[in-house]
Image (cartoon, helix red, strand yellow):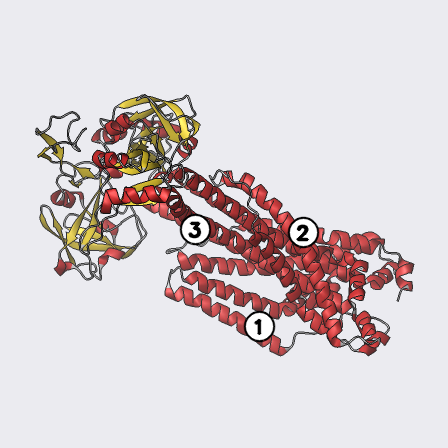
């Protein structure tokens, strides 16, 4: 039986070409994903570990214990005395501290870089970081940048870089090198600059050393030196070897690569699922076509078990060969992804390509086992072929031609009803991330319903669209008849395309709805053309009050808060840190200049603070509440929001508008009492606004805000609307001219924000569509395979049609229309399901979702489906048209 099976494979290998391609593509995607993710993770680890293992031990300030009921305390940085004690240890060859603060970096246009200023650090000789390009700064007029910062600003080694010092004065530096800070979270978000220790103290005013890096003395291992440093610094420090420190960082970024791996593998699983459908359909047709062959084996003594094992052996050989090819192709794809996709993701892939056993074994096992599993049902059918079938005059695929019984119809309709019920449940519960799982379950149940009712759907749709096609010509009429001749086979072939179409359409609906919803939100939250806000600097969240303090005797160097070089025992002014009463604001001159511009029609400001809520006015457990006012805005006209209760235009002195999340059960007409530094402020609730809108917390009139916070005389944010008909370039010039003297003010264009978001969504859509496109490609191979096997089965029929006068071109046209019909049915059902489940998924997570169905993208997908059908029929049609008429009629 084994020799017979292998001989059959060699004889009919052309039948398995598309099946091999389907398996190969699925395995390639999974193995390629694992190679790419493993290589990316290794690069992360190499970047982190390479910097961390440059030293033998790293000490960081210990995090203070959290005391319930108190605000979390911050870790206390190391001082000069602690650094010197570490340096004096016999186990230490050298040690340096890292000063760390934040300082404003200006780009080439003189604007502050980033929402938050980059870190300003000093790196000594014993540091875990080194220059990737050029060298570290040695003089006070030199600077090095993080590679990420240089990339975002366009600066190169040798350029002049400008920063602002503590007095907001510009200082120029020569860029001497670039430093790869890797994925260290302290530097990866806002970027970093490297300066000499003196300059960092001058412009960033760090409180002490944020880290001490240690190189062990000769003959001392890293664990010994780490233990010595830990004993010296005691409970004030957390000490780890360089390797341990790097592994901890690498573990954190490893989680990111795992998320990436899971996301990519999800697309691989989808591809394999579609491939499984193709494989099942292929083996089902092959077994049906080989009924006489299998029956003949039974006649000559083959047992049911031998026939069963023979079919599974075929599937095993096909799956193993295809999986080997898929793994090899996947390694190549993974290498290409690491080479080209890594930089696109902002990651320098520095490690060698990692080909782990998991990538190889998972591809081989998954591809082979899936193929064998997909062949189980056809193998069972093969054992039921009676020996007497060998005596029949012809072999048919009767096993695939059963009708659709009422049990199947009832079961299919029940599945659709359950799916609809689950979607209705998500709409009743409102937006909730957990609703995505329910929608996913509903989609899977609907897929099963499509599989169950597939033959009925094919027959009904073909009969509907077949009415006009029958009048087009003989090829179209024959194609319609052929499509409904074996609806189960057609349904099995189209389901693979239906899965891909549903996923792509569903994601396009989610993407379009998300874009529409966020555009509406931006329009509500930023009903203007430009917004100006100060750069956020967390180091400025403390202000000082002058007190006196005596310097510690015997401490060398400057004492924190003193002038450098102060004599011992003298009283000097120091800063006693307290919470900042007000954040950075916008100078009133900026607003005045903008109001003079003819291109500007409206300027209004936002001022915010917070106040405690008196217990008697609270319906919920609120302790404090953000309070805002919009200076110069006509509420309800310049600023709008969806209201739960009341009208926004009712806001006036003595009244307040609350966002729903802060209402705490209160309603319009109730009294809210705010406890402010100037005393209690009683306000009548005028309206309740929906959450996720432009209003947040309590919104009061300008008069009430001044009563509560008289010291807040400047705006936190400015909003600018252009005059009607104003030239956009002139408006932009006017806005930027107003902030020329204030480089730390950030200018955001709402139009640019929308455009950037739209571009981001388009990139995400086309990336995911390309990945899901793999499933579509496999589905097309499946349809092509079905057509090819169908042509083999109908060889004599095609020859008879040719003998009756059907031309070669007409035969090719008939098969092409048949394939296009199949693709359109699968795509049409998938598009319908995709729109429904895309809407449900978007509504499950987006409050106030604005539904949008991208008609253009759906039209393109329909056109692609037609093209896919034509391509799927090319080879089968050529083969059918090229078959000899007499030869086919003469063969049994």
- Mark earlier in primary sequence (3, 2): 3
Res 759 seen here: no
- Mark earlier in primary sequence (3, 1): 3
* Residue 758 in the image: above or below residue 593: below
Q: Secondary structure at mark 2?
A: helix
What residue is pinned by disc 1? 412
What residue is pinned by disc 3? 255
For the point 48% across and 62% down, the residue is 440
Q: Residues within 10 Å of mark 1 (few under 14, many from 20)?
A: many
Q: Are marks 3 and 2 in contact (CB under 8 Å)?
A: no
Would residue 515 be found to the left or right of residue 123 on screen? right
Distance between mark 3 and mark 1 Cα atoms: 41 Å
Picture quarter with the N terminus: bottom right
- Mark earlier in primary sequence (2, 1): 2
* Residue 785 in the image: above or below residue 539: below
Would residue 19 be found to the left or right of residue 430 on screen? right
Res 436 seen here: yes
């Amino acid at each position: 039986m084994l020799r017979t099976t292998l001989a059959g494979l060699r004889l009919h290998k052309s039948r398995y070409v598309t099946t091999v391609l389907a398996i190969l593509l699925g395995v390639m995607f999974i193995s390629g994903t694992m190679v790419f993710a493993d290589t990316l993770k290794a690069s992360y680890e190499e970047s982190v570990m390479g910097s961390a293992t440059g030293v033998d031990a790293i000490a960081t300030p210990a995090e203070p214990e959290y005391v319930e009921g108190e605000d979390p305390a911050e870790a206390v940085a190391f001082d000069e005395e602690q650094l010197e004690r570490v340096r004096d240890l016999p186990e230490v060859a050298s040690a340096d501290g890292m000063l760390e603060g934040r300082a404003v970096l200006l780009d080439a246009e003189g604007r502050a870089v980033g929402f938050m200023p980059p870190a300003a650090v000093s790196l000594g000789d014993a540091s875990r970081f080194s220059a990737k390009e050029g060298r570290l700064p040695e003089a006070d007029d030199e600077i090095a940048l993080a590679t990420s910062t240089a990339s975002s600003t366009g600066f190169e080694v040798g350029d002049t870089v400008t920063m602002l010092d503590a007095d907001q004065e510009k200082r120029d530096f020569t860029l001497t090198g670039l430093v790869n800070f890797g994925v260290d979270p302290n530097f990866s978000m806002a970027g970093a600059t490297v300066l000499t220790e003196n300059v960092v103290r001058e412009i960033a005013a760090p409180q002490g050393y944020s880290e001490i890096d240690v190189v062990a003395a000769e003959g001392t291992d890293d664990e010994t030196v780490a233990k010595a440093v830990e004993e010296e610094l005691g409970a004030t420090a957390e000490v780890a070897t360089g390797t341990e420190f790097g592994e901890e960082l690498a573990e954190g970024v490893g989680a990111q690569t795992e998320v990436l791996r899971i996301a990519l593998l999800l697309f691989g699983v989808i591809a394999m699922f579609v491939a499984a459908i193709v494989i099942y359909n292929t083996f089902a047709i092959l077994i049906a076509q080989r009924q006489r062959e299998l029956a003949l084996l039974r006649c000559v003594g083959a047992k049911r078990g031998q026939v069963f094992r023979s079919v599974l052996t075929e599937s095993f050989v096909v799956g193993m060969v295809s999986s080997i090819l898929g793994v090899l192709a996947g390694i190549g794809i993974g290498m290409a992804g690491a080479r080209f996709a890594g930089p696109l993701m902002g990651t320098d892939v520095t490690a060698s390509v990692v080909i782990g056993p998991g990538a190889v074994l998972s591809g081989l096992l998954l591809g082979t086992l899936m193929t064998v599993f997909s062949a189980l049902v056809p193998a069972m059918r093969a054992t039921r072929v009676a020996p007497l079938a060998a005596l029949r005059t012809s072999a048919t695929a009767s096993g695939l031609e059963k009708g659709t019984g009422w049990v199947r119809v009832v079961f299919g309709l029940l599945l659709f009803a359950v799916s609809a019920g689950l979607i209705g449940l998500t709409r009743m519960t409102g937006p909730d991330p957990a609703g995505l799982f329910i929608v996913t379950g509903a989609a899977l149940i609907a897929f099963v319903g499509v599989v169950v009712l597939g033959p009925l759907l094919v027959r009904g749709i073909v009969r509907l669209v077949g009415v006009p096609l029958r009048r087009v010509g003989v090829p179209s009429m024959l194609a319609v008849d052929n499509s409904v001749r074996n609806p189960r086979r057609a349904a099995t072939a189209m389901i693979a395309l239906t899965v891909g179409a549903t996923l792509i359409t569903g994601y396009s609906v989610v993407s379009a709805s998300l874009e529409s919803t966020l555009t509406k939100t931006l329009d509500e939250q930023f009903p203007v053309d430009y917004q100006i806000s100060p750069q956020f600097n967390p180091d400025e969240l403390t202000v000082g009050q002058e007190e006196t303090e005596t310097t510690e005797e015997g401490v060398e160097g400057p004492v924190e808060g003193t002038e450098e070089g102060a004599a011992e025992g003298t009283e000097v002014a120091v800063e006693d840190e307290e919470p900042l009463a007000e954040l950075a604001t916008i100078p009133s001159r900026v607003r005045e200049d903008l109001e003079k511009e003819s291109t500007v029609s409206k300027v209004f400001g936002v001022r915010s603070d917070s106040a405690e809520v008196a217990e008697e006015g609270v319906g919920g457990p609120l302790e404090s509440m953000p309070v805002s006012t919009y200076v110069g805005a006509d509420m309800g006209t310049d600023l709008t929001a969806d209201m739960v209760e009341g009208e926004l235009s009712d806001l006036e002195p003595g009244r307040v508008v609350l966002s729903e999340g802060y209402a705490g059960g209160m309603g319009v007409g109730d009294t809210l009492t705010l406890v402010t530094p100037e005393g209690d402020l009683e306000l009548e609730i005028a309206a309740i606004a929906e959450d996720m809108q432009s209003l947040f917390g309590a919104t009061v009139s300008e008069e009430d805000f001044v009563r509560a916070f008289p010291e807040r005389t400047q705006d936190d944010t400015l909003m600018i609307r252009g005059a009607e008909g104003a030239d956009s370039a002139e408006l932009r010039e006017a806005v930027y001219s107003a902030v020329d003297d204030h480089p730390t003010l950030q200018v955001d264009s709402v139009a640019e924000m929308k455009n950037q978001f739209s571009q981001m969504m388009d990139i995400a859509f086309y990336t995911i569509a390309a990945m899901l496109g793999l499933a579509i490609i496999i589905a097309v191979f499946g349809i092509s395979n079905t057509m090819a096997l169908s042509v083999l089965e109908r060889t004599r029929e095609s020859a008879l049609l040719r003998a009756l006068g059907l031309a070669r071109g007409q035969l090719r046209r008939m098969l092409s229309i048949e394939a296009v019909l199949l693709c359109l049915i699968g795509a049409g059902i998938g598009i319908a399901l995709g729109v429904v489940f895309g809407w449900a998924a978007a509504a499950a997570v987006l409050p106030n979702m604005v539904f949008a169905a991208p008609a253009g993208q759906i039209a393109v997908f329909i056109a692609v489906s037609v093209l896919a059908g034509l391509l799927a029929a090319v080879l089968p049609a050529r083969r059918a048209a090229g078959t000899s008429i007499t030869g086919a009629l003469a063969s049994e």
